[in-house]
Amino acid sequence: MRYSGFQVLKQALSGHKGWGRAWRDPEPQSQYDIVIVGGGGHGLATAYYLARSFAKARVAVIEKGWIGGGNVGRNTTIIRSNYLLDGNEPFYEYSMKLWEGLEQDFNFNAMVSQRGVLNLCHTDAQRDAFRRRANGMRLNGVDAELLDAEGVRKMAPFLNFGSARFPIKGGLLQPRGGTVRHDAVAWGYARGADSRGVDIIQNCEVVGFRIENGICLGVETTRGYIAAAKVGVAVAGSSGAVMAKAGMRLPIESHVLQAFVSEGLKPIIPGVITYGAGHFYVSQSDKGGLVFGGDIDGYNSYAQRGNLPVVEDVCEGGMSLMPMIGRAKLLRMWGGIMDMSMDGSPIIDKTDIGGLYFNGGWCYGGFKATPASGMCFAHLLATDTPHPTATAYRFDRFRKGLVIDEKGMGAQPNLH
Ligand SMILES: Cc1cc2nc3c(=O)[nH]c(=O)nc-3n(C[C@H](O)[C@H](O)[C@H](O)COP(=O)(O)OP(=O)(O)OC[C@H]3O[C@@H](n4cnc5c(N)ncnc54)[C@H](O)[C@@H]3O)c2cc1C
């Protein structure tokens, strides 16, 4: 069934009893052409683009929990393409372009809202760095504007302009950046993939890989063995644990990242605002809640919950940037598991095991990458060659010293 305004009116006349299921609940088959492990945003997008744009293959997505239960339904929904380095910028801009046509493409309302992403700067050196990044973006054909303090004040007069310690000197604005309703992205891709014949199998954990003579023949799951000509792993925060089952050790650590939502308030935050003197960022959801977050917890963990020192740190950042936030009540908070890579950039590549492919290392910026990640992983699985925008995301970049260290932090996953 196609979703449309007409369909809403039609269904309203019959008490909304005619809506079909958004996706089926199929039994796993014994064999597929391609199995995607992980039903998060990246796994579902991969299946969708495989079915829509590439092979006429029999594809299954194997998810240990439920669709939307991982980071795709836990993130703070920010999309942007304001990167500096060549390995990253074309990829993230490609993702932005896919976001811009996504809702029409998969016929689902994902509430794509390009309200702008504003990074604040508080020192002259930071302003110079932003100018450089803005120039890099423009050279790649991406929208970027430098604002002075007055320009920032016009957009967000409620910020703390009187701070002697961290004066707001201006900001880097990407007007096309913004937010997208995160779990609707998972649902939209799931529905689109299912309608094109992909089997989405929930409550089915991959517990091992059957590998013979260096070739992956399929996956062992809690619902039995499933054979596959190709297996693509896209399990985000569980990357290290899952790939260990294939005998691989990854340049990735898992850390917790927390998110926070306040009670609903009248519209006040124009887009996404990030603080440059501490790690704090904030936007406002359509329901009115302030959605904010900051640093990862900084220790290795597979728990989907965080600890109080980071709660305090994030709230301090919020109070320093916009003291009025102290009047708002915190409504809820949660954590997700981040697959932090050694250079802060992702991996979309074949492994040394025949028929086994990997997608991960998204750190805490993988939501905005979802459409391009899915398209590039589908391209790799279907053609065995990397997509032109993802040629840098190879495993061997760590061996060859070709790291894409956007933040210049070195091999410090907890700082990327
Ligand atoms: C609090 C928070 C805020 C964030 N904010 C942003 C943001 O504003 N912007 C942005 O771009 N990014 C953000 N991110 C990062 C982004 O959410 C992730 O990088 C991205 O969602 C990861 O890809 P995914 O959607 O495929 O992951 P997931 O949704 O986690 O999907 C992986 C799936 O694999 C499944 N799985 C794991 N092991 C197995 C197994 N053995 N068998 C079968 N299935 C398995 C999991 O159950 C899970 O559903 C944030 C993350 C968090 C936690």
Image (tube, rainbow, N blue to C red):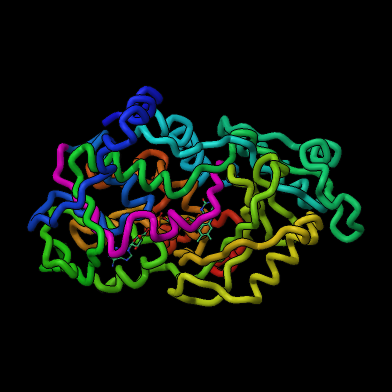
Give coordinates of residue 280: x percent, y percent.
68, 58
Residue 306: percent from left, percent from top: 55, 73
Depth check: give the residue in front, 390 or 29: 29
Q: Is residue 62 left or right of residue 406?
A: left
| Residue 371 seen by the camera | yes
Image x and y of residue 307, in percent: 58, 76
Say if 387 sits above or below 415 in the image. Answer: above
Quadrant of the frame with the C terminus:
bottom right
- From the viewer's perspective, tell me whether residue 162 is left or right of residue 62: right
Magenta span of residues: 56-81
Q: Is residue 128 magenta?
A: no
> On the rendered image, what quadrant is the N terminus found in?
top left
Ligand 1 falls in which quarter?
A: bottom left
Question: What type of secondary structure mainly makes up the magenta span?
Answer: loop
Side of 74 relative to 262 (left or right): left
In the rendered image, residue 69 lying in the magenta stretch gets the answer yes
**Image location (x, y in percent) of residue 245:** 25, 73
Which of 44/242 is in front? 44
